[in-house]
Amino acid sequence: MLFVESRSAAAGREAWMRRFRVKSAHRDYPVVIGCGAWRALRELPLARYSSLFVLTERVLWKRWGERFLDHSGLDGLRVVFVPGGERSKSLAELERVASALLRGGADRRSLLILFGGGVVGDLGGFVASTFMRGIDCVQVPTTVVAQVDSSVGGKTAVNVGAAKNLVGTFYPPRAVLADPVVLSSLEERVFRSGLYEVVKHAILAGPPLFDELERRIGGLRPDSAPSLERLIAAAVKVKIDVVSRDEREAGGRRVLNLGHTVGHALEAATGYRYFLHGEAVGWGLLAVTRLASRLGWLGGPGDSGRSDGERMARLVERVGPLPPIRHLKPGAVLRLLPRDKKAVGGQVHWVIPERIGKVRIVPDVDRAAVAAVFRELQTR
Ligand SMILES: NC(=O)c1ccc[n+]([C@@H]2O[C@H](COP(=O)([O-])OP(=O)(O)OC[C@H]3O[C@@H](n4cnc5c(N)ncnc54)[C@H](O)[C@@H]3O)[C@@H](O)[C@H]2O)c1
Ligand SMILES: [Zn+2]
């Protein structure tokens, strides 16, 4: 088994907590999920660090900083702020943060705590991996995307111009501590955007998680932490399982790109300003589901009276309304899809669902079929 699971029954209201261990070439690290997970910082060997820094966004820290200090028991933290938004994943911001750390007295034995969504995690992980050739970091994810996806797996990156994640490293954190209570301050749209990634994980995982999500999708709210924690744990476990087997995307990790081939093209075609990432992935999931149906892979109606393809599409749609794509020029989007193996160094692959719980990696798919599917989705 590649991950270890255990429950810790703390006293009182924080009775539920789930722990996994991610196997990594560099080091193994724990992922702790549940209301009160930040307390697990107390278990780290903090005495080995010369100083403790937090990288976060100002609004986020104002809302949650006190609770974090209370739960983690940390004092003497120095806080470095980054502006919110994808634009902070830049080399300019890396330089600014590195300078702030230096001014604040950071050295090789400092710990950097990354308190935020995927932007803080990706930028901060990159800073940690390069500052004085690498300092330890801990991921404290505060969005659904970050809790089920970006905080685990050790990928860090910044964007260069329009090229997303062009410069980055593999750098596992010392720990990942996800408390779903923090999701209660998320805007509804940002919350739902993360749920598309949860749907992606559920399609990869298959029946238990998929069925549960089908049952519960209508009732999920940002402020229902107790009901979210098990779902988040189940969703992140899918990623943990995959990256523990294949940290560097040589093989199995590619399945995590389900829905992302079309998703990335949609984001790029709209300058990364129109969709939230998860929303673009939602459209991408609808696209590959239709492509799979064209390939005759998704079978006929099952016990529920619906085919797997219909169930997947319905689950995506039930997350909430996706931003319309009717006005987009198909050519402009399709041009941004990877073309063939040589185009991006052999990295091109489509991940197409065969059924709920099983996907297949396909080197390329018929462009006419992709174009037809895109037009179908535009007039859906
Ligand atoms: N490294 C990986 O493996 C990986 C995987 C998936 C995504 N990503 C990256 O993650 C980024 C997207 O992550 P994201 O969706 O978390 O975006 P994000 O970090 O920009 O957060 C989304 C918004 O939510 C706000 N926010 C964050 N936490 C909040 C909270 N608790 N309450 C209220 N507001 C809060 C932020 O200010 C921001 O406006 C992208 O850059 C993507 O490339 C990386
Ligand atoms: Zn994604």
Image (tube, rainbow, N blue to C red):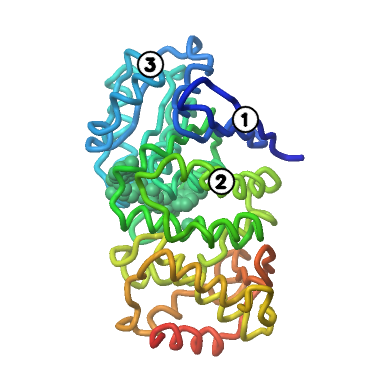
| Image point (46%, 22%), residue name | 39
Q: Is residue 140 left or right of residue 360?
A: left
Q: Earlier in the sequence, mark 3 or mark 2?
A: 3
Q: Residue 290, position in %: x, y?
A: 56, 81
Q: Which quadrant of the structure image shows residue 55?
A: top left
| Residue under label 3 | 74
Helix, strand or loop status at disc 2: helix
Instruction: Give the residue drawn at x 28%, y 63%.
Output: 273
Point out which mark residue 236 bears: 2
Left or right, 163 with reference to 189: right
Q: Earlier in the sequence, mark 3 or mark 1?
A: 1
Residues 146 and 257: in front is 146
Kind of residue at badge 2: Val
Q: Nearer the viewer, mark 3 or mark 1?
A: 1
**Residue occupying the far top of the picture:** 47
How far is mark 3 from mark 1, CA to CA?
24 Å
Q: Quadrant of residue 280 in the image?
A: bottom left
Q: Is residue 250 visible?
A: yes
Kindly indicate whether the residue at mark 2 contacts the one at mark 3 (C-beta within 8 angstroms).
Answer: no
Which element is circle 3 on?
Answer: loop
Report the number of discs. 3
Mark with earlier residue (2, 1)? 1
The Cα–Cα distance between marks 2 and 1, rounded to whole angstroms, is 15 Å
Above-or-below relation of 366 to 314 = below
Horizontally, residue 270 falls left or right of residue 220, namely left
Residue identified by numbered label 1? 7
Name the amino acid, label 3: Leu
For label 2, count other residues whose C-alpha is less than 10 Å away and answer few (under 14), some (14-19) or many (20+).
many
Above or below — where is 34 with respect to 217?
Answer: above
